[in-house]
Amino acid sequence: MIKLTIKIPKRKRFKLKPRQIDEAAQILVDDLQQTVPYDTGTLYRGIRRRKTANGVEIYIRGKRNNEVAGYLIEGTKRHFVKPVKKKALAWFDGGRTRFSRGHFVKGIKKGYWKFQPRKRALNKFTKRLMTFIKAA
């Protein structure tokens, strides 16, 4: 499972309510969802968060979503694709429908998608937590 763990120091964690940690973690989830390559939306919807004993964990839900995310992060080689359940593959290309019983596709470059929040989102996350701590 692909996951990202963010630890919150113990003395600060006790000043926060679980709802506040969850609200701040949503900032990071939103940022990751903005950077995900949007095809069908299942990977986009599969990015989740949960509170752990030491902080927050952001993860990708679902076996297939983890496979796809792995390909986007690690990349793939040129490979042959063929239909599994149907007789032919179909897709739209410039207003025309194309069909194929199998063909080679170029691979995905390594690092096409990074499963890490951008600096701006991490700063917003930190500021939100600090706002909650100061208010307590």
Image: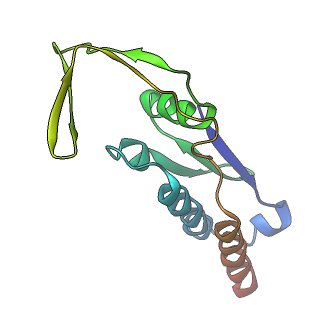
* Quarter containing the N terminus: top right
Q: Which residue occupies the foreground of this view, 124 or 34?
A: 34
Side (left or right) of 136 relative to 61: right
**Residue for point 49% across, 50% down:** 36
Side (left or right) of 89 relative to 9: left
**Residue for point 52% across, 56% down:** 35
34 w.r.t. 44: above or below:
below
Q: How many marks?
A: 0
Where residue 2 sits, quadrant-wise, is: top right
Where residue 117 sits, quadrant-wise, is: bottom right
Q: Which residue occupies the foreground of this view, 100 or 47?
A: 100
**Residue for point 47% across, 27% down:** 106
Extreme residue toward the bottom, this view: 135
133 w.r.t. 84: above or below:
below
**Residue for point 83% across, 61% down:** 9
Where residue 40 sits, quadrant-wise, is: top left
Residue 107, position as x, y percentages in the image: 51, 27
Residue 10, position as x, y percentages in the image: 83, 60
* Quarter containing the C terminus: bottom right
